[in-house]
Image: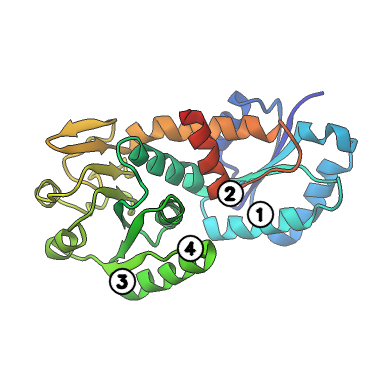
Amino acid sequence: MKNILLQLDTDVQPSTFDSVVAIDSGAEVMFRHGGVTPDQVAGLVHGLIFTRAPSKLNHSAIYVGGSNVDAAEKLLKSVTQSFYGPMRVSVMLDANGANTTASAAVICGGRHLNLEGANALVLGGTGPVGQRAARLLIRAGANVRLASRSLEKATAICKQIADDVQIGSPEPLATSDDASVATALEGVQLLIAAGAAGVTLVTEEVRRQAADLKVAIDLNAVPPVGLEGIGSQDKAAEQGSQICYGAIGVGVTKMAIHRAAIEYLFSRNDLVLNAEEIYALGMDLEG
């Protein structure tokens, strides 16, 4: 029996990237739907699950993607609400690569630091990747500072994360210039830059002067990079006392997690893979 993956994308054109990774990871047949809205989900899901016996539903799975992460979360909710009893399949959410990227960034940081009790700063923390990285860091026991240009926005996101994880809250910060970034970096061992493409968040001078910083991770591959002086292909590159990762360097781990998650979908029919589950899978890959 062939492995079928139903790809539900919030964008008009389903992601070619996600489709290629899926095919390379064990999906033998792809049903690709773009511009999907929550009210359309039940019909698509029922068409997938009612055609196979419950004992064979591990050969069917769903991938939820698209560039709008909030919209994709609503699709995921509609997907899980469409299941009942044994009539369900495994589903994965990785809209805009947010879950696999955040998981990879935190895992890369954990290779060089004990995250339990570490001080971490997430720049661009109000975006989808930054929010997920902050969540995962808190669950790993880190003390997290979440920064944005807007303190009001950072504060709102920190409250939302605290409500989600129920075990701690990030500290909201506003960073708009070198002085505020330098202050935010005081006492920080791990820095993750998850800002918008083509925006430098930390100058090389400020980064190198951060006395406690041990690991710096930039998730922006579009020039100019988010952390000045770190190349997009850097992977555990040493710069003085700092270990540095660029977006492509992190991408090696991100792609391994993405492929493993797709493979895992076809191992059983009751998985729901969101940020925490994808991170746990990535940690398993680390051994």
- Mark 1 closeness class: few <14, some 14–19, many ≥20 residues within 10 Å: many
| Residue depicted at 43% across the width and 68% down the height | 157
Does dot 3 land on a helix, a strand or a loop? loop
Left or right, 254 with reference to 50: left
- Mark 4 closeness class: few <14, some 14–19, many ≥20 residues within 10 Å: few
Tell me which numbered mark, 2 or 1, is placed earlier along the sequence. Answer: 1
The residue where tag 4 is placed is 167
Question: Could you tell me how far apart the alpha carbons at marks 3 and 2 are, in whole angstroms?
Answer: 27 Å
The residue where tag 3 is placed is 150
Does dot 1 land on a helix, a strand or a loop? helix
Q: Is residue 7 visible?
A: no
Tell me which numbered mark, 4 or 3, is placed earlier along the sequence. Answer: 3
Tell me which numbered mark, 2 or 4, is placed earlier along the sequence. Answer: 4
Where residue 76 is drawn, which disc sits there? Answer: 1
Q: Is there CB contact under 8 Å for labels 1 and 4? A: no
- Mark 3 closeness class: few <14, some 14–19, many ≥20 residues within 10 Å: some
Where residue 88 is drawn, which disc sits there? Answer: none
- Mark 2 closeness class: few <14, some 14–19, many ≥20 residues within 10 Å: some
**Closer to the camera, 136 or 219?**
136
Does dot 2 land on a helix, a strand or a loop? loop
Q: Quadrant of residue 27?
A: top right
Which of the two discs, 4 and 3, sits closer to the camera? 4
**Closer to the camera, 68 or 63?**
63
Tell me which numbered mark, 3 or 2, is placed earlier along the sequence. Answer: 3
Q: Which amino acid is tagged 1?
A: Leu
Where residue 274 is drawn, which disc sits there? Answer: 2
Does dot 4 land on a helix, a strand or a loop? loop
Q: Which amino acid is tagged 3?
A: Ser
